Amino acid sequence: MLLLESESEAAAEALRDAMDPVWYSLSTEERRLLDLRETAVITSIEGIRSPVAGAVVRRPPVKANAAFPMGPIRNWRKAS
């Protein structure tokens, strides 16, 4: 938000207005925790680490055996 404010106050204000419903749906405790956040400038991606576990690394999905359409797709509105 700070970066957006430095570029365009109007854009930052529009984003804040769009996020108001989310903000006001939070509990008082959730808002308090978000207000405690700090800002920092990242100077190197070396300081950013993320643990890799089974929840992140998964086997690729099995390919479906569906035929690739060779002509125009008819009745596509019924399928969408």
Image: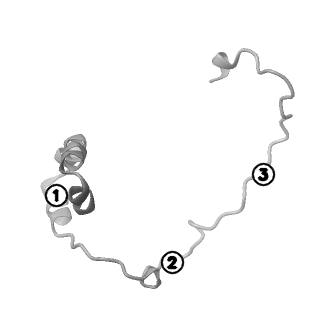
First of labels 2, 3 by sequence position: 2
How far is mark 3 from mark 1, CA to CA? 42 Å
Which residue appears at 30% of the width and 77% of the height? 41
Q: Which residue is mark 1?
A: 31
Q: Position of residue 50 (x, y in %)?
A: 48, 76
First reached walking from the N terminus: tag 3 or tag 1: 1
Q: Quadrant of residue 68?
A: top right
In the rendered view, would you say 20 is above or below 78? below
Q: Amino acid at mark 2?
A: Pro
Q: Where does the C terminus fall, quadrant-wise?
A: top right
Question: Residue at (80%, 48%) from the top-left corner?
Answer: 63
Vertical comparison of 68 with 38: above or below: above
Disc 3 residue crowd, few under 14, some 14–19, many 20+, Cα 10 Å: few
Query: Could you tell me residue 1's position as x and y percent?
Result: 24, 58
**Left or right, 46 with reference to 78:** left
Point out residue 75 in the picture as x, y percentages from the top left corner.
71, 15
Considering the numbered disc 2 on the image, is that residue within a helix, a strand or a loop? loop
What amino acid type is highlighted by mark number 1? Arg
- On screen, residue 34 versus residue 65, left or right, reads left
List the residue tagged with mark 3. 62
Could you give the CA–CA distance between mark 1 and mark 2, rounded to whole angstroms? 27 Å
Task: For mark 1, give the secondary structure.
Answer: helix
- Can you give x and y, in whole percent of width and height, for residue 69 in the image? 83, 29
Residue type at mark 3: give it.
Val
- Looking at marks 1 and 2 on the same chain, the residue that comes earlier in the sequence is marked by 1
Instruction: Give above or below for 25 relative to 71.
Output: below
Characterize the local packing of mark 2: few (<14), some (14-19) or many (20 or more) Cα atoms within 10 angstroms. few
Would you say 7 lies left or right of 52 here? left
Task: Report the residue marked by disc 2.
Answer: 51
Is residue 71 found left or right of 14 in the rendered image?
right
